[in-house]
Amino acid sequence: MSVATLDRVDDALGRRVSMRPLALLRIPIGLIALVHLWPFLDDARHGVQYRDTFYEPYASWYPELSRGAYGVLLGVGAVAAVCMTLGLLTRLACAVTFGVVAYNLFLSTTHVHSNRAFLTIVLAGLAVAPCGRELSLDAWLRGRRGLPPLDKLAPAWPLLLLRFEDVTVYAASGLSKLLDPDWFGGTVTWLRVVHTRRQLEASPLPAWVTDLLLERGFHTYAAKVIVLTELFIAVGLCFRRTRVAAVMVAVCFHVAIQLTASVEVFSYLAIATLLIWLDPSPPAREPDSPSPSSA
Amino acid sequence: MRVLGRRLLVAAVVVAQLFFVARGYWSDHKEFGFQMFPEASRWEADIVRVTADGRRIPIDQPWSGYRWEDLVQDWGLAYPGVRHHADAGLDNQLAFLDAALDWVADHTPRDHETRYLEATVTTWFNDDEPEVVVLRSHRR
């Protein structure tokens, strides 16, 4: 890579941009983390933990807490997730939420699902970004104390990394289907529907819709639409001209997934994460606005 | 120094993520590979405990105060005799079942008669013909 290219990359990573997209993202992500942690916490409250049934640690050296400490840790994670949404002690709350979710994720291979992995990535991005300087109780309390607002601009690299991860999710998913003849040819989607024939026939869908969904030929085209939709979202998000269309398609895509499949928090997470594609360009300075502090 | 650190961190994340995406094509568990809804494959298994005297006892019968469905609950493994969809693909499902056999062998101390557990697994990879795989726990 040439020096000029590296300089351009450094400029992009270090460019100061508005953290508003990440401040907005922080609000739903805290709630989503809470929803994710809740079943673990609820089980722990009733004396049930992952170690009571089959689990498979990734490494023998990975630290496992005592039963009591594990329950407390989940409770701390849940409180931190709420603080994250409220923007209270935001930096600490984001770091703790990320730490608890990541620790719990890597306790066992059985804990890892794609939606949880993506949630961990998003939490990591928020933990390293100053996303509590606006739309937060921290900012409000600071104002009440008469202190100047903190600088709402920060280097772009956490935002750019999250964008890279978001694109990767769609691209990896779409590419794996594109390369799989059974997927691209419609066999997988057709069989998934056929395997749920009973539920489909008992659903309020009109008979002609049911018949169409059970028709193999229909899936020859439908599968290609699904794969190309994922790839369009991945590519479309990368370019300003197609970004709005990609976001709209992504929202429709995730609503459809939520209605037809069980994906834990994935749909909410994926839709919320689209907030990172808001324009982070610094707003024009208002002439009489107070000068921010970078403390 | 700050610029170098930032450059290294970003490069590490990008390289690691691309590695995990590639690893999804050969790994049983596709962590961070983001291969969603990969297959329409299904599986079912007859699991038995093989005792020291050679008896083969189905695990749907409780033993020594243990019940399989209490010991193994995630990833559709609680009732292996019922045909299940392999949510994250057959390789992933078989890896979990294999690990579960070992876990049960290790976590049933009141059971003094079982030597190992054995699963005869029938798999249907998408619309392919069924295949039979035999998995065994380690010997106790």
Image: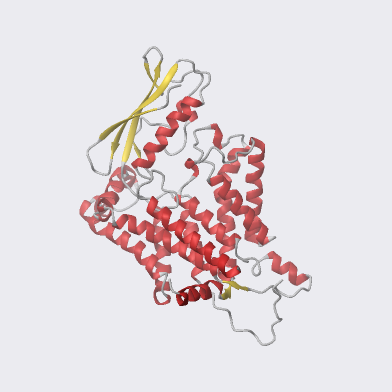
Q: Does A73 appear above or below A283?
A: above
Q: Is residue A59 left or right of residue A237?
A: right
Q: Nearer the viewer, residue B105 or A198?
A: B105
Q: Nearer the viewer, residue B4 or B27?
A: B4
Vertical placement of residue A66 versus A91, above or below:
above
* Placement of the N terminus of chain B among the 4 image quadrants: bottom right
Residue A207: percent from the left, percent from the top?
A: 27, 51
Residue A21 in sight: yes
User: Would residue A55 appear left or right of A207 to someone viewing this image?
Assistant: right
**Residue occupying image coordinates x 60% and y 43%:** A41
The residue sitting at the left extreme is A217
Depth order, front residue of A44/A6: A6
Q: Describe residue A184's horizontal placement relative to residue A153 as left or right.
A: left
- Give percent across and percent down for residue A289: 69, 83
Q: Relative to A95, is A8 above or below?
A: below
Residue B3, quarter of picture: bottom right
